[in-house]
Image: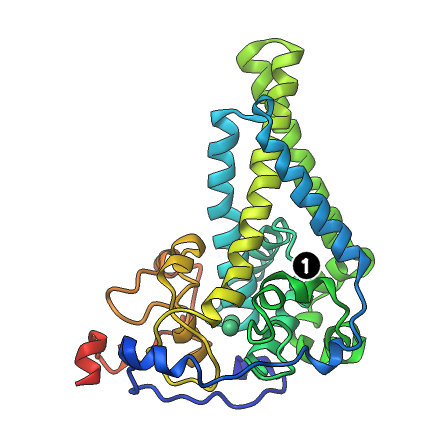
């Protein structure tokens, strides 16, 4: 976790030069055994709000099966939304900036990124950050809110449905995100679930934009209605579900399968497939080793699109104090093999 955040945490075990070839990584996979559900989530009590909201968005996304909702515009808007809301909002905003402070930027820009993150239906910024900091504090130990060492289902989605006293208790919650809650902007989003209202408004804006596009292109109410709902289903619901699962896959798959550059005290992995769908977040073992680094790719073959965007922000003066991997600072942008040797 970010040392600058002022939140309590265990020190990260950095073993930066311990490159582990694939065979060794496979052997290491069995180092961590089965875990029980976190004590704070026992006895299991379902949180109906989360069960309902996530079931509903999945059902709404399934409307895409009906070809009436399909349009090329809707598909393109949905794909573009993955970059805008997931990469900018979650990867850069919620994760690398708010949770780990891998760079600094003007407040208006930070708030804009946070609002983009809100439009992914992944909880409010403060709650997301609190849970993620808890994950880094006890990664793949029993208190970890979403370790897949409990079960793949638990690590991927099961943990969200269950009440966890660690982040439902206001005192705990505030303790882990005191830095964020000092900002009235995040407090407002938290109160009366305003963040959820923002998500609804953004969905309505997609619907309205679709109506406008449909009206101008077809000149008929039927065409406008079809395009409006196409943008709502593909541009909001399908995109939301895709992004939810790509984020959850980092918690589940990237803690089970892949290679390890660093012998971190957890089961984190670098997984190229997850990296592909999450635009750089798949180099998860690198991230656990150096959490404040704004780049999760450490070697030339570890492509990290999110990092390139942050680098772009840095070039135009929007991002400052950008934290880079330590191996870069030492001028050792070497391949793993070179480091191993
Ligand atoms: Zn992790
Ligand atoms: Zn993190």
Residue tagged 1 = 123
Q: Residue at x 54, y 47 (%)?
A: 242
99 lies above or below 185: below
Residue 14 visible, this angle: yes
Give coordinates of residue 214: x percent, y percent: 58, 18
Q: Judge by depth and name the residue closer to the eye, 222 or 272.
A: 272
11 lies above or below 285: below
Q: Quadrant of the C terminus?
A: bottom left
Give coordinates of residue 142: x percent, y percent: 63, 83
Q: Residue at x 68, y 40 (%)?
A: 59
Mark 1 neighbour class, 10 Å CA radius: few under 14, some 14 to 19, many 20 or more: some
Q: Judge by depth and name the residue closer to the eye, 274 or 206.
A: 274
Give coordinates of residue 31: x percent, y percent: 45, 86
121 on left or right of 324:
right
228 lies above or below 126: above
Give coordinates of residue 111: x percent, y percent: 60, 57
Circle 1: element type? loop
Q: Judge by depth and name the residue closer to the eye, 161 or 127.
A: 161
Q: Residue at x 58, y 74 (%)?
A: 147
Disc 1 C-beta below 8 A from ligand 2: no
Q: Residue at x 42, y 79 (%)?
A: 29
301 on left or right of 177:
left
Identify the image's colour scheme: rainbow, by chain, secondary structure or one colour.
rainbow
Rendering quarter of residue 220: top right
229 lies above or below 276: above
Residue 103 visible, this angle: no
Number of marks in the image? 1
């Amino acid at each position: 976790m970010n040392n600058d955040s002022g939140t309590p945490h265990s020190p990260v075990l950095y073993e930066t030069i311990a490159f582990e070839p694939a065979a060794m990584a496979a052997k290491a996979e069995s180092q961590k055994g089965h875990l029980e559900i976190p004590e704070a989530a026992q006895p299991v009590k379902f949180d109906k709000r989360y069960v309902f909201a996530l079931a509903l968005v999945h059902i709404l996304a399934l409307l895409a099966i009906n070809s009436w909702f399909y349009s090329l515009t809707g598909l393109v808007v949905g794909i573009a939304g993955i970059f805008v809301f997931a990469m900018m909002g979650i990867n850069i905003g919620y994760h690398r900036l708010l949770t780990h402070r891998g760079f600094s930027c003007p407040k208006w820009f930070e708030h804009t990124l946070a609002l983009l993150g809100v439009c992914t239906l992944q909880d409010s910024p403060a709650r997301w950050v609190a849970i993620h900091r808890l994950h880094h504090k006890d990664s793949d130990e029993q208190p970890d809110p979403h370790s897949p060492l409990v079960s793949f289902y638990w690590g991927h989605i099961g943990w969200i449905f269950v009440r966890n006293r660690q982040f439902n208790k206001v005192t705990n919650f505030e303790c882990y995100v005191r830095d964020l809650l000092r900002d009235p902007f995040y407090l407002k989003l938290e109160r009366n679930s305003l963040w959820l209202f923002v998500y609804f408004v953004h969905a309505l804006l997609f619907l309205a934009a679709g109506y406008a596009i449909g009206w101008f292109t077809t000149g008929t109410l039927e065409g406008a209605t079809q395009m409006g709902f196409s943008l709502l289903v593909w541009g909001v619901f399908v995109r939301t579900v895709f992004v939810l699962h790509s984020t959850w896959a980092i918690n589940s798959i990237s803690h089970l399968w892949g290679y390890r550059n660093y012998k971190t005290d957890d089961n984190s992995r670098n997984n190229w497939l997850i990296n592909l769908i999450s635009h750089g977040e798949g180099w998860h073992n690198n991230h656990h080793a150096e959490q404040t680094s704004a780049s999760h790719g450490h070697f030339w073959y570890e492509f990290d699109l999110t990092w390139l965007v942050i680098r772009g922000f840095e070039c135009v003066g929007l991002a400052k104090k950008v934290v880079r991997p330590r191996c870069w600072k030492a001028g050792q942008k070497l391949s793993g093999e070179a480091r191993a040797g």
